[in-house]
Amino acid sequence: MKNLGIKQRTNRTACILAALFLLIAIPVLGGCGSQEPESAVEETAAPEETTQAAVSDGENLRHFSAKEFDGGRFTEEELAEKDLTIISVWSTAESGSVNELWELAAIEEQLMDNVRLAVYCEDGSDKKDRAEDLLQQAGFGGTALYKATGDLKAVLGGIEEYPTALFFDSEGSQIGEPLIGVPEDTGQTYREKINQCLGDMGKGMIGP
């Protein structure tokens, strides 16, 4: 009987200890189950965007497009065809830039093959018919543009006066300072500016 009593007390003690263990273990296990491991949280977090579109610097032409009045499109690929591309920006609402079209038409006809003179109509999207009529009257047979996108749109956004002529090399980098306003001697001024740009690039000049 004594042995039986000892066994009963031993079993009772074991049961009490087991119960105490469960009371302690259950909250601990429950707490562990309610927290997601740190590594798992990091994996489910939204990844930081790493492929952002290139932002224009507002000066150079790397990726762009513009409509041509003859129905084509002008892009950075066309820039690569010439050592120097001039883009003269004009507006149908500015008489000075409109009158300059006649002189630009004469300059365009005299350029060497490695130089392009293009004109860009700032309000060409809204005044397309008017712009086309003026270009035809002036006899401008070169590249005539409007409705720019990409880098060209960003660059043109900084222009405050018409006309303004910008100069770019074959890679779309802007060369020298823009020509702002109508020069007193347009032909001579453009000739000197073109020679300066070509000289800076180590290219042949167009003469005095």
Image (cartoon, rainbow, N blue to C red):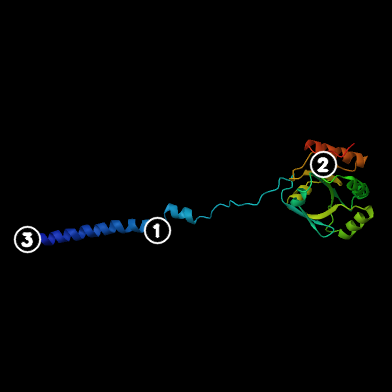
**Which numbered mark, 2 or 1, is in the foreground of this view?**
2
Considering depth in this image, is 40 or 178 the residue closer to the camera?
178
**Residue 167 shows in the view:** yes
**Is residue 88 shown left or right of residue 20?**
right
Graded by Cα atoms within 10 Å as few (under 14), some (14 to 19) or many (20 or more), the crowding at tag 3 reads few
Q: Which residue is mark 2?
A: 178
Q: Amino acid at mark 3?
A: Asn
Residue at figure coordinates x 90%, y 54% from the top left: 135
Amino acid of disc 2? Pro
Nearest-to-viewer mark from 1 and 3: 1
What residue is drawn where x is 8% and y is 63%? 4
Image x and y of residue 54, in percent: 66, 49
**Can you say which quadrant of the picture contains the C terminus?**
top right
Residue on which disc 1 sits: 34
Q: Residue 180: x percent and y percent?
A: 85, 42
Left or right: 68 in relation to 11: right
| Cα distance in 3D space between marks 1 and 3 | 46 Å
Which disc is residue 3 wearing?
3
Name above or below for residue 19 compared with residue 155: below
Q: Amino acid at mark 1?
A: Ser
Number of numbered discs present? 3
Determine the secondary structure under disc 1.
helix
Residue 159 is marked as none
